[in-house]
Image (cartoon, coloured by chain):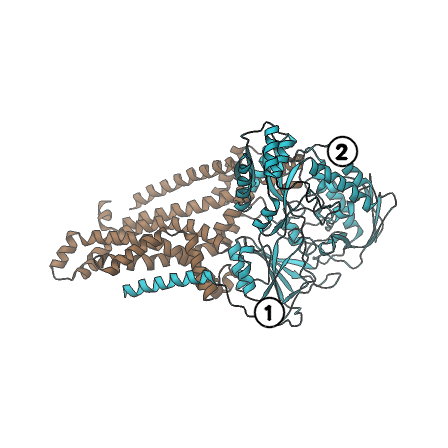
């Protein structure tokens, strides 16, 4: 009997090894039926918000889950149409020729989830509070607003102190969200927005469940319920997709993608993002204050090979990604050339250079390993200091205590960081600062974009940082799911139009 | 027995006080803070300072500690800085996953450890006993993560019998699904802990086999196996209770790992997330609750020993 147990155990082990080496058999795409209005859509996400207080708590996870779904501003952006500004709580708006006055016409028949109607007063106080209260996220976006008023019940006028071409875009962000005046909701765990979904339940450490809001002003949401399933572990997420626990899985591991494809129930999609993998050089501190050293470090990295290694990435050659205004293909401005890198380092007198890379531990080790070997090839010793994100915020972001640092900057239109010498990049260039200020002040979109492109060229030319890659995350979308959004899903996940067909 | 129990209880309280101080201090040494995380990469230093003030992080440390201890005495473990929820509420919610998981793991460990440990000792000169012992050696050395992944590959992805990850959103309102969700995680922890237990039971049994009273009983006409079962096992049982007390701590550590692996919304996963978010009032409450749990188990084990073992009972 004992021998039989031993035999069974070894059979089991052999079986396990066999199973890991083969993929599940394909069963063909599921038949697409009618959209089911009672359906539930389950989406795998990786990063859970730490609370639901979108006004006060940072983090892309909050914007991803709540903006457009639960909370809305006067305007929003359409990620799948080049981030075009589209109406939300305002039906239309006009901008005065001098670019100083924005007049919004409020949508009628909008209600908050508690049933009360949206008023012009709610809009004015929301924006005024966001401007005045510095603890509100992105409050600085409204610093330039001189006055907010409501001449009649369906109009709100915002006047700026100086023109800002990015102002409407800023209103699509957190500072532009509209809340009920005097709302006493416990926003850390509950909500009261105007969006197509209500928050139904939040099981911390597990999932956030949204339910269709039947009093919504526009087309009602296509599904009755959305479950955002927070599964950090990549293999658990793959298993969840393979076993049909989720209808859509975002940010899947490309190494495990074939298992999901093998079921025949998913199509793999890849969208554009503004998620920039930036290797920051401490421009304020020797030896990286020397441009030759910065250029050498950029020349030492084969960016195409890096993108291939990471799979879900593409080379990004300058500070501005393709989705943002001012983008220009800067390919070739710096191309892989270790010999030139060694020369530059010798010129700069930086032999036997030893540098430290501070990198949050949420990023895969592949990246650091790649950099270590690339730099070793040109004689630079790179020490990798893995820290948790909180430590990174203190050491790098606040205290600027670093040589090299890597994080992903997911925000759209954040070129301003290169024009702010107090930002942790420490890049201080008067010309860039002037060009950026001009690009904001003009009312002509094309001119603004040209000015940004010019500033970006200088930032790139000065080797202010190394733009390692642009993330191109992959999503597995169930074949029974329609209208799922594609672009910038790590900051916006508008789900109102998504439908799920009955099988 | 009562005086002994009181002494032990005193030690338990001292242990908790020391633990609370250690937890409090070690968490304050961690770099980074919650205000910085809440503010994020868009906040200016002034904004972070304002947040720090509003979150009460500027209060002197000794005052924070005393306030925490004061709350503890009234049964209040503290309040989360991020969600405003009492730590006790959160712990009770998450314990609904972790406690059943720990209990099921313990059952698996016992089922694996005790019968097979005794069998392996009895058959130590035969192939079967040796195979069991070698198998247990190997299993005890297996990392929990790997064991869990293998189980998922075979029973969840391969055979489709059990869910590969997650816990039903309805929780224990859907008892069947909840139970099924915990089977693989419990087996993962239980088999590894059980293999360690097996080896201990084996050596304790072997020791008992060599004892005079077993030989005497055998001389009186019992078979060696029956002599062991009648007279040896009660002695083995005593030492097993001690080991089990230690293994409960191992099971809790295992739960932290396994909850990550299987995406279970339990105490372990909450703890890891809270450390990352620097929600220190919550982390210290959770750590103290876990420490308290392990200390209480130790206390109960000591008492059980007293009550069960006639020699210790007489001595007191």
C-alpha gap between disc 2 and disc 1 = 56 Å
Quarter of the picture containing the N terminus of chain A is bottom left
The quadrant where residue A367 appears:
top right
**Residue B26, image x and y in percent?**
47, 37
- With B289 as the anchor, is A389 left or right in this view? right
Q: Residue at x 57, y 67 (%)?
A: A264
In terms of secondary structure, where does tag 1 sit? Answer: loop
Q: State the cyan chain.
A: A
**Residue B115, image x and y in percent?**
29, 60
Give the numbered dot on residue A29.
1
Image mark count: 2
Name above or below for residue A138 compared with residue A29: above
The quadrant where residue B129 appears:
bottom left
Q: State the brown chain.
A: B
Q: Chain of mark 2?
A: A
Q: Residue at x 55, y 29 (%)?
A: A351
């Amino acid at each position: 009997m004992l021998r039989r147990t031993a035999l069974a155990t070894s059979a089991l082990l052999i079986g396990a090894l066999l199973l890991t080496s083969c993929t599940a058999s394909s069963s063909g795409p599921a038949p697409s039926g009618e959209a089911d209005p009672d359906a539930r859509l389950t989406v795998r996400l990786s990063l859970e918000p730490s609370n639901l207080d979108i006004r006060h708590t940072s983090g892309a996870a909050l914007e991803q889950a709540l903006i457009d779904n639960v909370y809305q501003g006067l305007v929003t952006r359409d990620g799948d149409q080049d981030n075009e500004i589209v109406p939300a709580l305002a039906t239309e708006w006009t901008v005065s020729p001098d670019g100083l006055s924005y007049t919004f016409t409020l949508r009628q028949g909008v209600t908050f989830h508690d049933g009360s109607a949206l008023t012009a007063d709610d809009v004015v106080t929301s924006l005024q509070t966001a401007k005045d209260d510095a603890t509100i996220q992105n409050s600085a976006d409204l610093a330039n607003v001189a006055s907010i008023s409501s001449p009649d019940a369906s109009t709100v006028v915002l006047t700026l102190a100086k023109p800002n071409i990015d102002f409407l875009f800023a209103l699509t962000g957190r500072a532009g969200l509209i809340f009920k005046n005097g709302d006493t909701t416990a926003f850390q765990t509950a909500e009261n927005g105007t969006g197509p979904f209500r928050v139904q339940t939040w099981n911390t450490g597990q999932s956030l469940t949204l339910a269709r809001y039947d009093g919504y002003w526009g087309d009602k949401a296509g599904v009755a319920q959305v479950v955002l399933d927070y599964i950090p572990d990549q293999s658990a997420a793959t298993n969840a997709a393979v076993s049909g626990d989720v209808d859509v899985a975002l940010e899947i591991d490309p190494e495990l993608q074939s298992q999901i494809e093998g079921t025949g129930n998913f199509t793999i999609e890849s969208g554009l993002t503004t998620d920039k993998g930036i290797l920051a050089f401490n421009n304020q501190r020797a030896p990286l204050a020397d441009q030759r050293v910065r250029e050498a470090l950029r020349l030492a990295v084969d960016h195409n090979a890096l993108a291939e290694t990471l799979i879900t990435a593409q080379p990004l050659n300058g500070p501005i990604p393709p989705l943002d205004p001012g983008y220009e293909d800067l390919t070739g401005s710096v191309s892989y050339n270790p010999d030139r890198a060694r020369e530059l380092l010798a010129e700069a007198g930086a032999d036997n250079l030893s540098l430290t890379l501070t990198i949050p531990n949420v990023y895969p080790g592949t990246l650091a390993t790649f950099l270590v070997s690339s730099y070793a090839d040109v004689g630079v010793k790179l020490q990798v200091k893995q820290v948790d994100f909180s430590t990174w915020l203190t050491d790098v972001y606040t205290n600027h205590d670093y040589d090299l640092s890597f994080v992903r900057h997911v925000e759209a239109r954040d070129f301003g960081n290169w024009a702010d010498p107090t930002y942790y990049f420490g890049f201080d260039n008067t010309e860039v600062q002037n060009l950026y200020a001009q690009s904001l002040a003009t009312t002509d979109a094309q001119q603004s974009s040209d000015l940004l492109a010019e500033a970006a060229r200088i930032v790139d030319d000065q080797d202010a940082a190394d733009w390692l890659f642009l993330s191109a995350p992959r999503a597995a979308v169930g074949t029974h799911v329609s209208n799922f959004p594609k672009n910038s899903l790590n900051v916006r996940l508008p789900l109102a139009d998504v439908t799920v067909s009955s099988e | 027995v009562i005086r002994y129990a009181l002494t032990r209880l005193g030690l338990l309280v001292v242990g908790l006080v020391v633990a609370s101080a250690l937890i409090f201090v070690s968490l304050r040494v961690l770099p980074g803070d919650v205000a910085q995380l809440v503010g994020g990469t868009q906040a200016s230093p002034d904004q972070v300072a304002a947040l720090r003030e509003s979150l009460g992080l500027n209060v002197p440390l000794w005052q924070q500690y005393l306030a925490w201890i004061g709350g503890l005495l009234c049964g209040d473990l503290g309040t989360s800085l991020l969600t405003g929820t009492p730590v006790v509420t959160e712990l009770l919610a998450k314990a609904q996953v972790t406690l059943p998981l720990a209990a099921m793991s313990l059952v698996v460990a016992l089922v694996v450890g005790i019968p097979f440990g005794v069998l392996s000792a009895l058959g130590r000169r035969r192939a079967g006993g040796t195979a069991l012992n070698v198998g247990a050696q190997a299993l005890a050395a297996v990392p929990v993560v790997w064991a869990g992944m293998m189980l998922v590959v075979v029973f969840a992805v391969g055979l489709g019998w059990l869910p590969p990850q997650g816990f039903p959103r309805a929780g224990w309102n859907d008892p069947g699904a909840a139970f099924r969700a915990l089977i693989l995680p419990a087996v993962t922890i239980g088999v590894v802990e059980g293999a360690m237990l097996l080896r201990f039971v084996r050596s304790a049994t072997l020791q008992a086999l060599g004892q005079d009273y077993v030989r005497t009983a055998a001389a009186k006409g019992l078979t060696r196996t029956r002599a062991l079962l009648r007279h040896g096992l009660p002695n083995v049982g005593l030492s097993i209770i001690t080991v089990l007390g230690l293994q409960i701590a191992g099971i809790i550590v295992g739960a932290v790992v396994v909850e990550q692996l299987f995406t279970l919304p339990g105490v372990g996963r909450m703890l890891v997330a809270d450390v990352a978010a620097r929600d220190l009032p919550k982390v210290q409450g959770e750590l103290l609750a876990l420490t308290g749990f392990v200390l209480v188990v130790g206390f109960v084990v000591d008492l059980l020993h007293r009550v069960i073992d006639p020699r210790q009972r007489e001595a007191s």
